[in-house]
Every structure is written in structure tokens, then in C-alpha cells.
């Protein structure tokens, strides 16, 4: 009988620890509009941020659709484009990512090989939001 009570007590404590974390998780959505070259970040459906981005320039493409983060790196360097820095990378489809750029003067116009470029400060904010609420609670929506 004591064993059953002890197990029930442990389960109760575990549930109290796990359930609040699930209840506080929020859905983070990054919606990128290719025609406007903007990203709006929503948390539980409310706009938290609106930023200029750079997506694919002529001859390249940024994939359109709804994606989930597949991996995240605070510091990353392109394996395909001469080790270009990609700070606060959120990869969402194959080698495509949302990441910071040091070419901030081009934000608001197509300039990339297909990734979604952000000001490094904004890339850090997005990265932190996704990390704190969990990649499984995040989605990336890219529209024309």
C-alpha cells in the first residue's frame, strides 16, 4: 500500500511540473511575404514584430509553403556560399534558413540565394522566441 501511495505522489509531482510548462507554451508563427519583403512574427495569433527581410534575388528562389524549424544554430557558416556567416539560423527546409545578415542595407529587397535574411538583432529575437517556446510550437509560413 505504501508503494502505491508513493508512486501516486511521484506521479502527482511530475504532473504538476509538466502540465504548467505545456500550458504556458505559445505558438510562434513567422510569416514571410515575398512580394512585400517583410516578416511578421505572431505569438498566439497576435503580431509581436514586423521586420524587413531579403529573400531570393533573380535566378534563385525562396520556397513557398508552411514549414517547421528543423534545426537551429546560434553560429553557423554557409557550406555552400564561401563560409558566409548565418547568425541565429533557423533552418526550415533542406538548406534554407531564416538568419541574420551583415548586408543590412539590402533588407527590404531581394538579395539572397534563397534564405530569408534578417537584421542580426531581429534574427536573435526570432531565434530566442522559437527556442523559448520550442521548435515544435513554431511554424514558418512563406507566401508570394
Image (cartoon, rainbow, N blue to C red):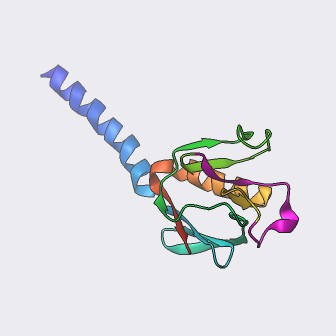
Q: Quadrant of residue 59?
A: bottom right
Q: Nearer the viewer, residue 21 or 26?
A: 26
Q: Nearer the viewer, residue 102 or 131?
A: 102
User: Which residue lies at the image location 76% right of the left edge and 73% below the top edge?
Assistant: 108
Please say if 19 is above or below 8.
below
In magenta segment, residue 144: no
Q: Is residue 116 left or right of residue 67?
A: right
Magenta span of residues: 95-110
User: Which residue lies at the image location 87% right of the left edge and 67% below the top edge?
Assistant: 105
Residue 142 can be seen, yes or no: yes
Q: Position of residue 121 (x, y in %)?
A: 78, 58
User: Which residue lies at the image location 49% right of the left edge and 73% below the top edge?
Assistant: 45
Looking at this rendering, what residue extends furthest in the front direction? Answer: 59
Q: Position of residue 43 (x, y in %)?
A: 53, 67
Q: Nearer the viewer, residue 42 or 58?
A: 58
In magenta segment, residue 99: yes
Q: Position of residue 60 (x, y in %)?
A: 66, 60
User: Which residue lies at the image location 76% right of the left edge and 44% below the top edge?
Assistant: 81
Q: Position of residue 20 (x, y in %)?
A: 41, 50
Amino acid at each position: 500500500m505504501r508503494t502505491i501511495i508513493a508512486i501516486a505522489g511521484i506521479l502527482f509531482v511530475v504532473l504538476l511540473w509538466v502540465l504548467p510548462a505545456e500550458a504556458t507554451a505559445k505558438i510562434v508563427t513567422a510569416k514571410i511575404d515575398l512580394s512585400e519583403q517583410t516578416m511578421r512574427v505572431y505569438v498566439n495569433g497576435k503580431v509581436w514584430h514586423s521586420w524587413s527581410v531579403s529573400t531570393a534575388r533573380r535566378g534563385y528562389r525562396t520556397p513557398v509553403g508552411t514549414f517547421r524549424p528543423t534545426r537551429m544554430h546560434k553560429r553557423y557558416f554557409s557550406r555552400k556560399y564561401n563560409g558566409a556567416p548565418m547568425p541565429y539560423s533557423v533552418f526550415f527546409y533542406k538548406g534554407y534558413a531564416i538568419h541574420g545578415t551583415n548586408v543590412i542595407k539590402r533588407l527590404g529587397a531581394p538579395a539572397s540565394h534563397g534564405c530569408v535574411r534578417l537584421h542580426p538583432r531581429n534574427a536573435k529575437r526570432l531565434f530566442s522566441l522559437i527556442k523559448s517556446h520550442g521548435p515544435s510550437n513554431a511554424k514558418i509560413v512563406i507566401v508570394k
